[in-house]
Amino acid sequence: MKNEKNKIKSFMDNLSSKRQEKDKNSKRSEYIGAIVVNVILLYIFNNLLNWQVYFITNALNEVLWIINIAIIATIIGNIMFIIFNPEWFRHIIKMILNIFAFTAVYSIYSVFPFNFSSFLIDWGLTIALIFIVTGIVIATIVELFLLIINILARFKLINE
């Protein structure tokens, strides 16, 4: 009977380790995908004025630097996740990246480097930017709470 329990435990441990390895590989592919997407975004944002997109104004130059910093920070963050990926670390880096994103989106909102022919489109984009900024703030607060919970759980495990 004890031998069967050991076999079952061994089988379950084996399944768990395979699942964790699969999760780890899928996370790595997500981070690599995020890096690729952000490199493409970096290229697009830096060429919008050259492509003479009709609704993008020269005011984009005023915010392009912070957009570039936010995108580059995201690329670096995802590279860091590939190298080092404990849960507490992810929460900290995500909060930092959210601060960069907040700054970039708020700058876009403040400068508004767009000129659509329609007041409704301008107004709609303004409202969308406000929602995005609000979402980033909420996401940052959630990451902070998750970090605190993770730290408290780790502390509790240490004291046991």
Image (tube, grey):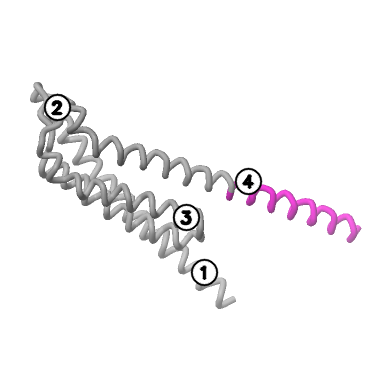
Q: Earlier in the sequence, mark 2 or mark 3?
A: 2
CA gap, disc 4 and disc 2:
44 Å
What segment carries the magenta color? 1-24
**Left or right of 112 in this view: 150:** right
In this rendered view, identify the residue nearer to me: 94 or 44: 44
Q: Which residue is mark 1?
A: 154
Q: Earlier in the sequence, mark 4 or mark 1?
A: 4
Foreground label between 1 and 3: 3
Q: Quadrant of the C terminus?
A: bottom right
Q: Tell me if label 4 and label 3 are in contact, CB under 8 Å.
A: no
Q: Tell me if label 2 and label 1 are in contact, CB under 8 Å.
A: no
CA gap, disc 4 and disc 1:
24 Å
Say what secondary structure mark 4 lies in: helix
Q: Quadrant of the N terminus?
A: bottom right
In this rendered view, identify the residue nearer to me: 80 or 23: 80
Q: Which residue is mark 4?
A: 22
Q: Residue at x 12, y 36 (%)?
A: 113
Q: Is residue 18 magenta?
A: yes
Amino acid marked by disc 1: Arg
Q: How many circles with numbers are drawn on the protein?
A: 4
In this rendered view, identify the residue nearer to me: 1 or 154: 154
| Classed neighbour count for the residue bearing mark 4: other residues with Cα under 10 Å, few (<14), some (14–19), many (≥20) | few
Q: Position of residue 6 (x, y in %)?
A: 84, 59
Q: Residue at x 39, y 61 (%)?
A: 92
| Classed neighbour count for the residue bearing mark 3: other residues with Cα under 10 Å, few (<14), some (14–19), many (≥20) | some
| Classed neighbour count for the residue bearing mark 1: other residues with Cα under 10 Å, few (<14), some (14–19), many (≥20) | few
